[in-house]
Image (cartoon, rainbow, N blue to C red):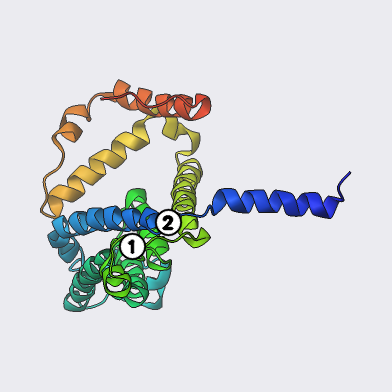
Amino acid sequence: MKPLSQNTNSLLHRVGETLRPAAQPVRPAVLRLTTGAFTIWNNMRRRSMFHKLNRQDASQFDPVGPVRVLSRPLPPRVANALYDAAQVTNIVATLGIAHRVSGLVNAALQLWTLSYRNSWGMILHNDNMALMHQLVLGLTPSADALSVDALVRDKTLTPRRFDRDYGGIPTAMNIATCAVYVISGVAKVRSPQGWKWATGNTLRDQIAADAVRKEVFGTQAPEAARRLYNARGFFTMAPIRSWISLTLDIPPPSD
């Protein structure tokens, strides 16, 4: 019979191999490109809305995260300049140009700009999830392939090497995704509605508030939000169906 310490070391070794499998640099590189492309598109299409948010009355400002170092909002020009700078660094980091520097700078700027946006209210978990992914990609060697850095250093976009650091990046992104959903779920239960969120009224109100916010800040509200607002039965069934799916591991319906 193996000693307990040996069994523990063997178990930890297997866990480590599962969470950080050896992989080629192309694996995290694809994630860097797709995540970067989505966030570039998503942020640029909302640029005018973010700029308008930065001009709100100071009484609406409630700093969160690193923005808590501020006692009052930044001048709109400064806040807008930081937001635009974050989009430039996002492009540079996505292309993998001097990624050891641009990845870190982009991670810091994305964290600041989203925290600043969240300081005006209406925190969206999908934005936070994209931010978490950018932080992971910016702080890891995700640009060792399919990047300008790889082309300059290795004279190829797909260098052939294996390392556990590459295999651990997707795992870290998955953990970040799970963490965001767990925190969102806990926030639902801890809200004034408590378990009443399962009736669908909270979801309905959030969709309505988001639609109004889009119209106030110059973008078009989804047509589906208008049509479904009075469909109370739909909003009651949606969270029940989600709870059943999570409990029984039922896949979502295909299109």
Q: Is residue 243 above or below residue 72?
A: above
Q: Is residue 137 above or below residue 209?
A: below
Residue 91 quadrant: bottom left
The reply to whether callout 1 and callout 2 are in contact (CB within 8 Å) is: yes
Expressed as whole percent of the image width and height from the top left, the position of residue 24 reads: 42, 56
Between discs 1 and 2, the one toward the N terminus = 2
Q: Residue at x 37, y 73 (%)?
A: 104
Expressed as whole percent of the image width and height from the top left, the position of residue 25 reads: 40, 59
Is residue 49 shown left or right of residue 38? Answer: left
Q: Which residue is mark 2?
A: 24
Residue 233 quadrant: top left
Expressed as whole percent of the image width and height from the top left, the position of residue 48 reads: 12, 61
Say which element carries label 1: loop
Hey, what amino acid is under mark 2? Gln
Say which element carries label 2: loop
Q: Disc 1 and disc 2: Cα gap in Å?
A: 9 Å
On residue 145, the disc is: 1
Q: Is residue 231 above or below residue 146?
A: above
- Is the N terminus in the top left, top right, bottom left or bottom right quadrant? top right
User: Is residue 136 something that shows in the picture?
Assistant: yes
Hey, what amino acid is under mark 1? Ala
